[in-house]
Amino acid sequence: MNKEQAFKLLAEQLGVSNNKAKELIDKGLVYWGNNKVKIARGLVDEDTKFRVEEVNDIVVLHEDEDIIAIDKPAFVDSYDVEASIKGATLIHRLDRDTSGVLLLAKNEAFLQRAIEAFKQQKVTKRYIAWVDGIFFEELSIDEPIHTERQGKAISRVDKKRGKKAVSIVRPLEVQGKKSKVEIEIETGRTHQIRVHLAYVGYPIIGDEAYGSVTKSKRILLHAAFIALLGYRFQAKEPRDIERYK
């Protein structure tokens, strides 16, 4: 069986440019069977049939003279959202796989007020996730997190070098050996929820980087609610969060 680079075969199948095919693979949207294509230049059989996941539309939850609240779909980079909205600046970020409420400021004065609210921990943030394992009682995780950046950011619990990080996890539902949980974070460290849940033995489904052995189209994490400076925003759970398969 002859081999071809994945991005070239995908470009041929879709009738798009090689660069567009690479972009789709890099965004984690391309599958063969139930397997995600991770390396654009990887060799695959010439008869491989690819499937490209659709990305939901970006939805504006609220807009006024100071702020825009977005319901960000999974597989979309926060900076791509920022680039698509003229004159708006990200107040915070969500990982590419994470869906939910994303906030942007429309002027410098409000941006600085929002940044200060985050620094002073005067922001309420609640997330929903599906995790490996049976989770049945509320748990407060107070473990410092240290982040290293070598290409991609990787975080871990580090009691000597880590910065304070607090996550409160509450059970919502159990389905087989998977659990749906709500997480409220009092701090905002890089990958905090992912690291904390993995640390206590409940990695988020699909989060291979932090120990999940369950395959999923994405990391099943959703930013459901955020409140700051008198605003309150909520993003409806997408289908893959509302019910696990």
Image (spheres, rainbow, N blue to C red):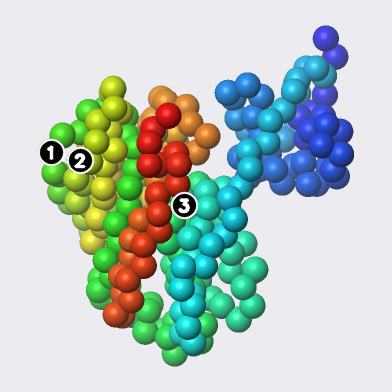
Amino acid carrying label 3: it is Ser
Residue identified by numbered label 1: 137
Residue identified by numbered label 3: 99
Residue identified by numbered label 2: 171
- Residue 171 in the image: above or below residue 63: above
- Residue at 48% from the left image edge and 60% from the top image edge: 71
Q: Nearer the viewer, residue 245 or 52?
A: 245
Image position, residue 49 (x, y; %): 74, 23
Image position, residue 164 (x, y; %): 23, 58
CA distance separating discs 3 and 2: 20 Å
Q: Earlier in the sequence, mark 2 or mark 1?
A: 1
- Residue at 85% from the left image edge and 14% from the top image edge: 2
Q: Earlier in the sequence, mark 3 or mark 2?
A: 3
Q: Nearer the viewer, residue 95 or 233?
A: 233
Quarter of the figure that contains the C terminus: top left
Q: Residues within 10 Å of mark 1 (few under 14, many from 20)?
A: few
* Mark 3 touches mark 2? (CB < 8 Å): no
Q: Earlier in the sequence, mark 1 or mark 3?
A: 3
Amino acid carrying label 1: it is Glu
* Mark 2 touches mark 1? (CB < 8 Å): yes
- Residue at 28% from the left image edge and 33% from the top image edge: 179
CA distance separating discs 2 and 1: 6 Å
Examine the rendering and report whether any part of residue 215 can be seen.
yes
Q: Nearer the viewer, residue 201 or 100?
A: 100
Q: Secondary structure at mark 2?
A: strand
Amino acid carrying label 2: it is Pro
Q: Residues within 10 Å of mark 2 (few under 14, many from 20)?
A: some
